[in-house]
């Protein structure tokens, strides 16, 4: 693992500084999700992800500090009418 850690280069997410693009709302939403994932995973707030932090991005459901982001993203994706709730129709539609 020490070799792997030496080969991982620091990555500063400058792409996350992009403003929401009104012409591409799906792209803007994706950037918003990625920004939130990054900020949550970067536990030491140094602007880079180390090996442990990166694992929490790949498997957010497996880490306490990223579980809430994973759940929030799932709710937002299922909530098609964006009212903050999942209706039975939205829930069933998400499973299909």
Image (cartoon, rainbow, N blue to C red):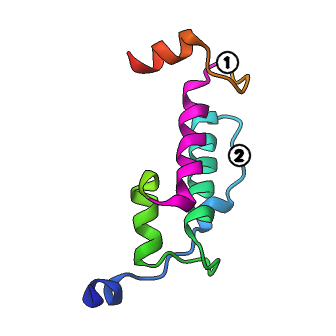
Quarter of the picture containing the C terminus is top left
C-alpha separation, residue under disc 1 versus residue under disc 2: 20 Å
Residue 67 position within the rendered picture, expressed as x and y whole percent measured from the top left: 53, 52
**Is 80 on the left or on the right of 7, as rendered?**
right
- Residue beneath the point at 53% across and 36% down: 74
Q: Where are the magenta residues, as a range?
A: 63-80
Q: Main secondary structure of the magenta part?
A: helix
| Crowdedness near tag 1: few (<14), some (14–19) or many (≥20) residues, C-alpha within 10 Å | few
Q: Secondary structure at mark 2?
A: loop
Question: Residue at left 58%, top 71%?
Answer: 42
Q: Are marks 1 and 2 in contact (CB under 8 Å)?
A: no
Residue, disc 2: 20
Q: Residue at x 54, y 9 (%)?
A: 89
Q: Earlier in the sequence, mark 1 or mark 2?
A: 2
In the rendered view, would you say 71 is above or below 39? above
What is the secondary structure assignment of the residue under circle 1? loop
Magenta run includes residue 1: no
Q: Which mark is residue 96?
A: none
Name the residue beneath numbered marker 1.
Answer: 81
Question: Quarter holding the N terminus?
Answer: bottom left
Give the x, y percent position of residue 6: 34, 90
| Viewer-side residue, 33 vs 78 | 78
Q: Nearer the viewer, residue 7 or 28?
A: 7
At horizontal 58% and vertical 49% (from top left) the residue drawn is 69
Q: Nearer the viewer, residue 64 or 52?
A: 64
- Up/down of 33 relative to 92, above or below: below
Q: Is residue 51 left or right of residue 71?
A: left
| Left or right of 16 in this view: 59 | left
Within 10 Å of the Cα at label 2, are there few (<14), some (14-19), or many (20+) other Cα atoms? some
């Amino acid at each position: 693992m020490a070799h792997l850690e030496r080969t991982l280069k620091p990555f500063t997410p400058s792409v996350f500084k992009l403003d929401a693009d009104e012409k591409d709302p799906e792209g803007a939403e994706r950037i918003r999700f990625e920004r939130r994932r990054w900020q949550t995973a970067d536990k030491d707030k140094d602007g880079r992800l180390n090996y442990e932090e990166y694992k929490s991005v790949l498997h957010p459901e497996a880490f306490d500090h990223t579980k809430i982001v994973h759940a929030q993203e799932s709710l937002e994706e299922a909530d098609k009418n964006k009212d903050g709730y999942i209706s039975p129709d939205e829930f069933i539609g998400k499973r299909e």
